[in-house]
Image (tube, rainbow, N blue to C red):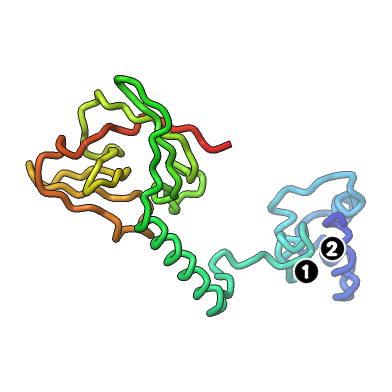
Amino acid sequence: MHWTERVKQKTKELNLSDAKIAREVSCSSALYSMWMNQTRNPKLESKMAIARALGVSVYWLDNGEEEPDPNALPLISLDDIHAFYQEIEDKQKAIQKDAGIRIIESDNESFLIRLDNDSMIDPGNAEKVLIPNGSTVQIDQDLEPKPGKILLIELEGQMLLRVWQRLSANQHIFKVINPLYSELKVSYTGDVLSIYKGTAVGFRCPL
């Protein structure tokens, strides 16, 4: 339905004449008639004035419904919350049990690993998935490890992808990107080179 049809319906409901609305809008009856016949388009200011005269919003004129409240939050049930936390718990248990990293191809300078968990996904930005589950990640062994980079480390016989944060010469924190799994960060005391296996330099998403 065109917005002018809603104006006509509302005008009829309120028992208002076109001439009265034209006076409210401060335009001639002829010009108002051209708007209603769709031979001319009013400026936004005039359209807003028509909406005010009818006691509605411009959004209602265009869509036939009230504009949604941008601050309104959807209702979430307790079952939804329980299911959400259960899913997080299940993922955490799976990741703690197995880092899910498999070497699939290698040469003298770099190698590829398969990442079979999602601890490196950034949930704060759905468009910025850093390393999605199932990706093939290229690891460069010759690069010097740098803080802030995603490093592949081997600790207690397990390979892990983590973001390196240096606390001091011999104190290090290796963090996951996904804050939902913040408890999986690793503290390490010693020379970082003794556990360093390479730096993540690129990845290919799963097919």
- Residue 172, image x, y percentages: 15, 47
Residue under pointer 1: 54
Residue at 15 percent of width and 35 percent of height: 193
Type of amino acid under label 2: Val
Asked if labels 2 and 1 touch by Cβ distance under 8 angstroms, the answer is yes
Quadrant for the C terminus in the image: top right
- Residue 154, image x, y percentages: 25, 42
Residue at 48 percent of width and 46 percent of height: 133
Quadrant for the N terminus in the image: bottom right
Q: Nearer the viewer, residue 152 or 66?
A: 152
C-alpha distance separating marks 1 and 2: 8 Å
Left or right: residue 100 versus residue 108 is right
Residue at 85 percent of width and 63 percent of height: 6
Q: Is residue 137 above or below residue 58?
A: above
Q: Nearer the viewer, residue 124 or 70?
A: 124
Q: Is residue 148 above or below residue 108?
A: below
Instruction: Please tell me the numbered disc located at residue 7.
Output: 2
- Residue 95, image x, y percentages: 39, 55
The secondary structure type at the circle numbered 1 is helix
Residue that lies at the very extreme toward the bottom in this rendered image: 78
Mark 2 is surrounded, within 10 Å at the Cα level, by few (under 14), some (14 to 19) or many (20 or more) other residues, namely some
- Residue 175, image x, y percentages: 27, 50
The secondary structure type at the circle numbered 2 is helix
Sequence order check, earlier mark of 1 and 2: 2
Q: Which quarter of the figure has residue 192?
A: top left
